[in-house]
Image (spheres, helix red, strand yellow):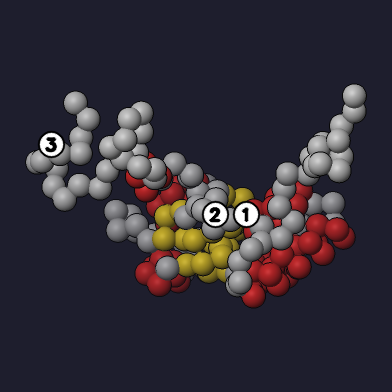
Amino acid sequence: MGIDLIAGGRKQGHNKKDTKSTNLYLHLLLRLYKFLDRRTDSKFCKTVLRRLAQSRLTKAPMSISRIALNMKGKEDKIAVLVGTVTNDIRLFEVPALKVCALRFTETARARITKAGGQCITFDELALIAPTGSNTILLRGSKKRECKSHWGKPGIPRSKAKPYLQSKKSSEGKKK
């Protein structure tokens, strides 16, 4: 017996080659990093290309405070995040950071630029550091609170957390 190749046996590559997004900028970035991946031996370009092709759910956001924590002592390098940079009001003083990301929230962009930092896009990063030299590649946490609500709460053996109107009522909570 062998592998039935016609029926879809022996799946080799599990990385997505393209995105289902309708965002034209994302498609242009994919073309740019496919070119850079092909023409350079950089592991950075390969990783960024793979992360650009991921679904929006796996492009987890990251807050300014988390970026500042990871970049402590590495202020001369560029923080690269394939995802959204969000604001964090718990961080009082934002250090001067150079951050490259797909998206920035308005408040996050304003706070970074006010502190003397820079917000860079991926096409600008390709001109500054095509092979990813002098950069730190970051990734947001996939453990998010919203995921605990996925599924059907209330049915047997379901671990989905219900959305409650108030925490006082015991309705919806397991005993």
Q: Secondary structure at mark 1?
A: loop
Tag 3 near tag 1, CB within 8 Å: no
Give the residue pinned by disc 2. 59
Above or below, comparing residue 108 to residue 72 in the picture: below
Give the residue pinned by disc 1. 54
Determine if residue 161 is in view. Answer: no
Q: Residues within 10 Å of mark 3 (few under 14, many from 20)?
A: few
The span from disc 2 to disc 3 (Cα, nearest Å) is: 35 Å
Which badge, 3 or 1, comes first in the chain's sequence? 1
Q: Locate residue 144, reporting x and y percent.
A: 41, 45
Q: Is residue 57 left or right of residue 10?
A: left
Which badge, 2 or 3, comes first in the chain's sequence? 2
Tag 2 near tag 1, CB within 8 Å: yes
Give the residue pinned by disc 3. 170
Taking the spot 54% from the left edge, 58% from the top edge, the residue there is 56
Which badge, 2 or 1, comes first in the chain's sequence? 1
Residue 175, by quadrant, is top left
Taking the spot 80% from the left edge, 42% from the top edge, the residue there is 8
Q: Is residue 64 left or right of residue 38?
A: left
Q: Is residue 137 left or right of residue 151?
A: right
Tag 3: residue type? Ser
Tag 1: residue type? Gln
Above or below, comparing residue 36 to residue 170 in the picture: below
Q: Secondary structure at mark 2?
A: loop
Taking the spot 68% from the left edge, 70% from the top edge, the residue there is 27
Q: Is residue 50 left or right of residue 152?
A: right
Tag 2: residue type? Lys
